[in-house]
Image: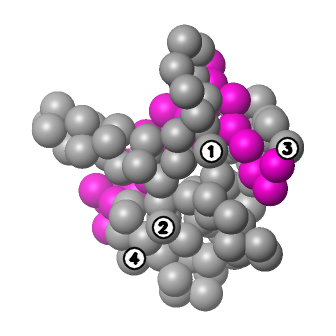
Amino acid sequence: MPARMQSEISHLFDFVTQSGCRFNRNGAWHDTAAARSHMEMKYEYLSGRGLIDSAEAFIDNAASKSSMTGKDYLVQCPGSEPQASGAWLRTELTRFRQSGA
């Protein structure tokens, strides 16, 4: 895996953990540790099968919707309404790239 892609995905995992938000998967709310753990499990499974070739593929395939039900994951940060986790993570990925990190 290219170093830049690994850096971006690692950043997104850390962003989830440090966000202070809660995450909804298939109708149940989870804390950041549970959300990260679930995304890491999906990431390991999918990357082992060659299905993660970019940070965008990570977001689309492991961090934005249930592979069992097809329902979008939601994220709700303090003081805001729930939103689709895919859009939330893409916004952060763009910010991270623009920061030059």
Q: Image point 85% across, 43% down: which residue?
A: 28
Q: Indicate whether residue 20 is drawn in magenta.
A: yes
Residue 69 in view, yes or no: yes
Q: What residue is pinned by disc 3?
A: 28
In whole angstroms, how far apart are the C-alphas of marks 2 and 1? 13 Å
Q: Give whichever of 47, 2 is nearer the camera.
A: 47
* 60 sits to left or right of 35: left
In whole angstroms, how far apart are the C-alphas of marks 3 and 2? 20 Å
State which region is magenta. 1-27
Mark 1 secondary-structure assignment: strand
Quadrant assignment, res 1: bottom left
**Local crowd at mark 3 within 10 Å, few (<14), some, or many (≥20)?**
few
Q: Outermost residue toward the right?
A: 28
Q: Decide which of tag 1 and tag 3 comes sooner along the chain.
A: 3
Q: What residue is pinned by disc 2?
A: 60
Q: Amino acid at mark 2?
A: Asp
Q: Decide which of tag 4 and tag 2 comes sooner along the chain.
A: 4
Q: Image point 56% across, 58% down: which residue?
A: 64
In the image, residue 88 sits, relative to residue 53, either above or below, namely above
Mark 2 secondary-structure assignment: helix
In whole angstroms, how far apart are the C-alphas of marks 3 and 4? 29 Å
Q: What residue is pinned by disc 1?
A: 74
Residue 46 in the image, given as x and y percentages of width and height: 62, 77
Q: What residue is pinned by disc 4?
A: 53
